[in-house]
Image (cartoon, grey):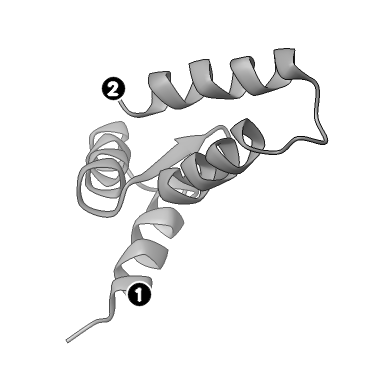
Amino acid sequence: MPTEAQIIGGHKANLHNANTSSEAKEHSKEVLREDFNVVVDGNKTKNLDHVAAGLKGAMHNDNIPEESQFTSAEKLGQIQK
């Protein structure tokens, strides 16, 4: 039985394989997003849980400008939709 990391790795590999169809790539993107909360952004994949954690940290960090804290809150709202 493959591990979660192996499944994610297989779908990521599929996205970069020139020999796979666009339908297969779309399926891999959908599986990554729906089952593993991972989004493909160009050639990069982002775990949305990690992105959300970073934005939450920025919202509560007193060392960054207040405007940046509000921007982080807005982006977090967009991610969680």
Q: Is residue 73 left or right of residue 66?
A: left
Q: What residue is shown with label 2?
A: 81
How packed mark 1 is, by other alpha carbons closer than 10 Å (few <14, some 14-19, many 20 or more), is: few
Residue at the image position 61 percent from the left and 16 percent from the top = 70
Residue at the image position 50 percent from the left and 48 percent from the top = 16
Q: Is residue 39 left or right of residue 37?
A: right
Label 1 residue SS = helix
Of the residues shown, which amino acid type is indicated by label 2?
A: Lys
Q: Is residue 30 left or right of residue 71?
A: left
Residue at the image position 31 percent from the left and 32 percent from the top = 22
Label 2 or label 1, whichever lies nearer to me, is: 2
Where is residue 39 shown, x and y percent of the image? 41, 39
- Front-lying residue, 7 or 25: 7
Where is residue 65 shown, x and y percent of the image? 80, 21
How packed mark 2 is, by other alpha carbons closer than 10 Å (few <14, some 14-19, many 20 or more), is: few
In three-dimensional space, the C-alpha distance between marks 2 and 1, rounded to whole angstroms, equals 28 Å
Indicate the quadrant containing the N terminus: top left, top right, bottom left or bottom right.
bottom left
Of the residues shown, which amino acid type is indicated by label 1?
A: Gln
The picture quadrant where one finds residue 5 is bottom left
Q: What residue is shown with label 1?
A: 6
Q: Upstream in the sequence, badge 2 or badge 1?
A: 1
